[in-house]
Image: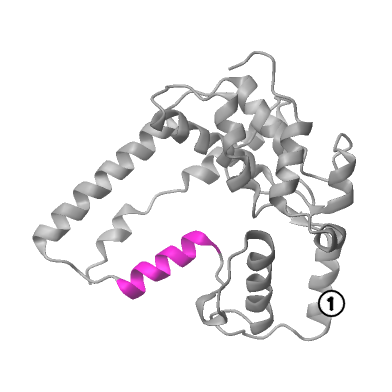
Amino acid sequence: MKLAARAGRIAPSPTLAMAATAKAMAARGIDVADFSSGEPDFDTPEPVKAAAEAAIRAGFTKYTPSSGIDELRQAIIDKLQADQGIRYEKSQVLVSCGAKHSLYNLAEALLEAVDDDLDVHLRQAGDDLVAFQQLVRKVPVAEPVMRHALDIVRATRPRNPDSKDFIGKWVAFGASVRAAQYLVLGGKARALTSGRYHVSFEDIRALTHPVLRHRIITNFHAQSEGITTDILTDRLLDAVPLPRSGM
């Protein structure tokens, strides 16, 4: 039996390897800013725990439709409409385990083998994209810039003792560490496409709206008052001062 060629390309996840290294460093007492797996650095909120327990006790433990239950798909539609002004039909919404899972399923479902000439063209384009991705990750980021990204993300959390009053009033759940990760990564790409080889504070701040827009969960008070995540992000940028070094 001949195994698929992709089986030979399977390798340990570099993201999880970075996470393990960061945890080991933290265990040794080193102050680490972990930008690897993007897991929340706080415990699962009590309402989420309670909802999961209630679902189990109610017998909601059977297989669900592969595209997601109707109530969840409708909730996604409503959230996108309220937060981002985008409207979808239920037939356009599919729930999966994550972005990588969805992209893999799409590729398996939609793509066929291509002819040799097209295959060479696609491989070259793919190689160029991978090379640019690798170049982006090599762009240096000064520690103050990285700390500024973390400060912005931490400021979104209502349980943060230093958070502003409007965060406690309007935010149910703030952004996780992954938001800071993508602020920095996006900042690297923005710097390169602007002809620079270092990330500035302005690169980080310019990306706060697209990065935080779907990562801040507003509460009933915000929704009833028409406070969107974009409005909150504007307030955040005013509340988190730009460091004085001017990078």
Q: Mark 1 points at which residue?
A: 54
At x 68% / y 33%, what residue is drawn? 150
Q: Which amino acid does label 1 sit on?
A: Ala
Q: What kind of element bears circle 1?
A: helix
Q: With respect to residue 188, does 60 lie above or below?
A: below
At x 41% / y 70%, what residue is drawn? 105
Q: What stretch is highlighted in magenta?
A: 98-110
Q: How many labels does the image show?
A: 1
Magenta highlight on residue 200: no
At x 66% / y 42%, what residue is drawn? 177
Residue lying at the far left of the rendered structure: 117
Q: Camera-side residue: 159 or 234? A: 234
In this rendering, position of residue 185 left or right of residue 163: left
Magenta stretch, main secondary structure, is helix
Position of residue 174 measured from the top left corner of the image (x, y, whole percent)? 76, 49
Using a 10 Å C-alpha cutoff, classify the residue at mark 1 as few (fewer than 14 neighbours), some (14 to 19) or many (20 or more). Answer: few
The C terminus sits in image quarter: top right
Magenta highlight on residue 106: yes
